[in-house]
Image (cartoon, rainbow, N blue to C red):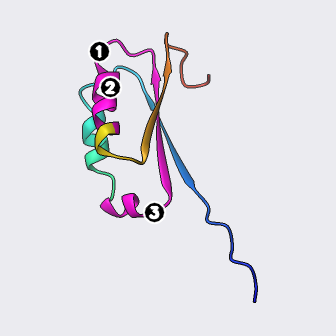
Amino acid sequence: CAPMAAKKKIYIIMPAYQAAKTIRSVFERLPAEMKEKDVRIVVVNDGCSDGTADIVNQIIQERSDTEMITHERNKGYAQ
C-alpha cells in the first residue's frame, strides 16, 4: 500500500491598504467551496487607518480560514 500524499495547503495573500470600503465585498465574492478546502487567507494590513483592521477582525470571527498580519505603518506591496 502506498503512503497517502500529504495534503497541501493553499495560501491566498491579500494585501490591504485603506480597504475598509471594499474588503468585506472581496470576501463575499470568494467561492463558498473554499471553506471546505485546505485554504488559508492571509490579509496583510499595510498600516491602514480607515478601520480595515476592525472589519478584518470581524471577518476572522466569522471565518476560521482567515488571519491577519499587521504592519504598524504602510510599507507598500514590496515589503
Q: Are marks 3 and 2 in contact (CB under 8 Å)?
A: no
Q: Label 1, on which residue? A: 50
* Residue at image coords 33%, 31%: 56
What x and y, as percent, mark residue 66? 42, 42
Question: Could you tell me how many numbered marks the image carries?
Answer: 3
Seen as rendered, the residue at the extreme right is 2
Against 60, residue 79 (above or below) is: above
Q: Are marks 1 and 3 in contact (CB under 8 Å)?
A: no
Q: Report if residue 45 lies within the magenta region.
A: yes
Type of amino acid at the residue the image marks with label 1: Asp
* Residue at image coords 54%, 48%: 11
* Residue at image coords 38%, 16%: 48
User: Marks 3 and 2, Cα distance to the nearest angstrom?
Assistant: 26 Å
Q: Label 2, on which residue? A: 19
Q: Mark 1 or 2 closer to N-term?
A: 2
Q: Are marks 1 and 2 in contact (CB under 8 Å)?
A: yes
User: Marks 1 and 3, Cα distance to the nearest angstrom?
Assistant: 31 Å
Type of amino acid at the residue the image marks with label 3: Lys
Q: Report if residue 54 lies within the magenta region.
A: yes
What residue span does the magenta drawing correspond to?
A: 32-60
Q: Label 3, on which residue? A: 37
Mark 1: which secondary structure?
loop
What x and y, as percent, mark residue 54? 29, 23
Q: Mark 1 or 3 closer to N-term?
A: 3
Against 79, residue 49 (above or below) is: above
Q: In which quadrant is the C terminus drawn?
A: top right
Q: Residues within 10 Å of mark 3 (few under 14, many from 20)?
A: few
**Residue 78, quarter of picture:** top right
What x and y, as percent, mark residue 32? 31, 60
